[in-house]
Amino acid sequence: MNDRWRWIFLFSWLVLPLGALAEPPEGVRAENQRPNVIVIVADDLGFGDIGMHGCKDIPTPEIDAMARRGVSASSGYVSAPLCSPSRAGLLTGRYQNRFGHEFNPGGKVPENFGLRVGEVTIADYFRGAGYSTALIGKWHLGWKPAFHPLERGFTEFFGFLGGARPYLPGKQVVRFNRGREMVEEREYLTDAFKREALDFISRKKESPFFLYLSFNAVHTPLQATEAGENRFLQIEDRRRRTYAAMTSALDDAVGAVMSKLKMEGLEEKTLVFFISDNGGPIANGSSNGPLRGTKTTTWEGGIRVPWIMQWKGNIPSGKIFADPVIQLDILPTALAAAGIPLPVAAKVDGVNLLPYLRGERESAPHPALFWRFGKQTAVRKGDWNLVNADGSGGRRLFNLRDDIGQKKDLSGDRPEVVTELQLAWDEWNAGNIPPTWDGESGDN
């Protein structure tokens, strides 16, 4: 551990007043074996495009198997229906609205675009605790030197800084970052990220590591290998066929990582998360199954995503967790598993899920979950969902237990519930700040 990161770690333990440290995390094993942590993020994967959610035309055996070996959240959410703000929330454990990271940068990238300096990332915590930390894949949280992954807690980086990249090398070789240097890549991009992840695990298997495996699959551009496309010739729609091949390559990569952990004897020592960064968009031919809406909306189809955890022998296997969870929970859950305390001053919005998954707590992890995306809003409290997804100010109320597709507006029948949820949202929103830049839907 270099001097800078040793100081950050010691500061969290020693310099803060004793009362400023949180209680020891619940759910930590007494022997505290310092598990590895891997966070796998798919990009624009539709809720309905994995087998466990009813997909028929695209097999996802590896992702489905991960769910059977662990816990799948049937109401798993992200805090934004768009790439960059969703990732900002993931890495900080805080609603990105707390620090103004509400949108992608849009067409003209603002000078100040990036994960705000001063926000502590999950990689900062793990690096400060002596872990090797790596980002492999998409960053999308700033281009300037101060925002670079190597300045935000990661000891290694292979990938790209922006929002999208070609998958296939064409006439011009695709270039990527390895650390701060630019390198050429000639392998299909999803396979390249798989290769790098397997190499990192091989090199770091003897000591604890944190790996953020941030795929850009299945984000546009729609590009698959010829062999991949040939697996799905039965799909007549060309866009959907290519999307299927890209999803299958993603599934193969997830399977390779999980097989590597098993081969190295690391399954019981590695906590793995799998999510999508937001719901599927129309542009890539994805499907959100029974959910209404798409990426860039606060309908369920924009914010409810595949959400899986695996930690063999430490959390249940084959469990479907029904209470709502959110990607903000990944940071406190992972730190609790590793025995790394969170200073109270961190003010994370996520919750350590381990005691809930193990049945040690019977209440729901969150009293309510909230969304603000420009003029679009949403709140979920229990089974109730109050949403304004068109920015008009009109509020619609749904009971998601009975109406997952948000088809029957109950606001006229239950005005008292509308008032209750709106008051809760207003109270939450009072702790947010205005967006730091404009640009709701840009993918740059």
Image (cartoon, rainbow, N blue to C red):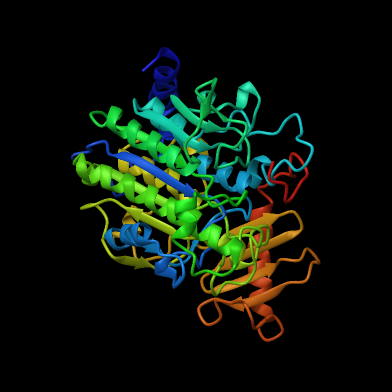
Query: 212 or 421: nearer the eye?
Result: 212
Residue 150 location (% of width, % of height): 51, 24
Specify the quadrant of the image occupied by residue 101.
top right
- From the viewer's perspective, is 387 left or right of 176? right
Query: 178 or 154: nearer the eye?
Result: 178
Task: Report the residue at 50% width, 22% height from top.
Answer: 179
Task: Report the residue at 31% width, 66% height from top.
Answer: 319
Residue 215 location (% of width, % of height): 49, 44
Furthest toward the bottom, the residue is: 413
Q: Quadrant of the C terminus?
A: top right
Tally the marks: 0
Q: Let me know if residue 64 appears in the view.
A: yes
Q: Quadrant of the N terminus?
A: top left
Task: Report the residue at 39% width, 31% height from top.
Answer: 126
- From the viewer's perspective, is 333 left or right of 102? left
- From the viewer's perspective, is 184 left or right of 248? right
Q: Let me know if residue 29 appears in the view.
A: no
Residue 227 location (% of width, % of height): 44, 52
Query: 175 or 21: nearer the eye?
Result: 175
Residue 118 location (% of width, % of height): 59, 29
Task: Report the residue at 28% width, 65% height from top.
Answer: 318
Specify the quadrant of the image occupied by residue 22.
top left
Is 238 rendered above or below residue 171? Answer: below
